[in-house]
Image (cartoon, grey):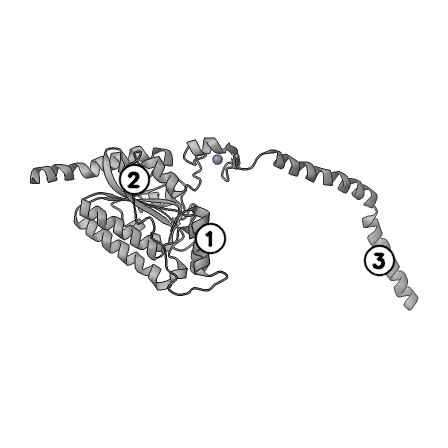
Amino acid sequence: MGTTTFTKKSLGLETVEPALTPTPTDKATTLPKKPRLGTGRSKKRDIPEGLWTKCPKCQAMVFDKELDENLKVCPKCNHHFPIGSRERIHSLVETCTFEEMDAQMTSVDMLSFQGVDTYASKLESHQKKTALKDAVVTGICKIGEDRAALGVMDFSFLGGSMGSVVGEKLTRLIERATEKELPVIIISSSGGARMYEGMFSLMQMAKTCGALAYHAKSKLPYISLLTDPTMAGVMASFATVGDLILAEPGAMIGFAGPRVIKDTTQAELPPGFQTAEFLLEHGLIDAIVPRTELKPRLCYYLDYLMEGREERAASGK
Ligand SMILES: [Zn+2]
């Protein structure tokens, strides 16, 4: 019996062997494969880093300088890459007119939040990485002929999350605009409320909307621009209460993420769900404005919205 099982085993080995018989050819193929991998790597090494960016939409290699000149929009397929707050401000406002507000305001770790990392260390590393103090830059500026209060969020700082600093800076901006009778423009890019600040970050939703209500009471316009992505707490507060709600092409906009909605509703989501184009069709957004056309479009809207007001103010005097 023992011998038979042994022979069976050897048969088994024999059956394995035929499968391995082309080993010499396998070896032959594995050998040239290695240099192929090697040449691929060396080719990549030949391209200096930071000169080219691969477009995730059309897969084209875009020269970084060309991308910068085109405000981080792919010249081939019009894909909008993320853009920093400083770069955005530079592209919109008249030279030397931006008076930044509360530039040094930073968050306090009120809850002594401990996760994989502490909140304090997260803040410190992001401040170093982005050279920003928090996820929004605010200030009074001139866009074309009009003075405006401008707030620009930066997704690279903790996912553009809204904590007490983002809320406070935006509220102060809106209050200054109300006081100086200026229109407000807020450019959002956010993953939502900042979980490290718990309830304090949720309170910012009511605070910013309250300030905007007083601004609206003074019959001053507020333009909200939603960029990729604008989600959750920001979407559920100041981002969607604009007199004009604009969005960048292809931006992802929503409250909960599509996976959460799909799991909760157990239903298939319609194509293009939570994109700017879908929301324009369904009436949430007033217009989709490509980044390269944003400045002239803002000038046009501001002229239109502020014109009557100036005339009324003049006649009142
Ligand atoms: Zn592209």
Instruction: Tell me the SS state at disc 1.
Output: helix
What amino acid is found at the position of numbered circle 1 in the picture? Answer: Ser
Q: Nearer the viewer, mark 1 or mark 3?
A: 1
- Residue highlighted by disc 1: 125
What amino acid is found at the position of numbered circle 2 in the picture? Answer: Phe
- Residue highlighted by disc 3: 12
**In this orientation, which residue lies closer to the viewer: 223 or 5?**
223
Other residues around mark 2 within 10 Å, as few (<14) / some (14–19) / many (≥20): many
**Where is residue 60 shown, x and y percent of the image?**
52, 34
Of callouts 2 and 3, the N-terminal one: 3
Instruction: Tell me the SS state at disc 3.
Output: helix
Q: Quadrant of the N terminus?
A: bottom right
Q: Is residue 215 shown above or below 145?
A: below
Other residues around mark 3 within 10 Å, as few (<14) / some (14–19) / many (≥20): few
In the image: residue 292, left or right of residue 26? left
- Residue highlighted by disc 2: 98
Q: Quadrant of residue 291?
A: top left
Of callouts 1 and 3, the N-terminal one: 3
Label 1–label 3 contact, CB within 8 A: no
Q: Residues under labels 1 and 3: Cα distance?
A: 59 Å
**In this orientation, which residue lies closer to the viewer: 250 or 206?**
206
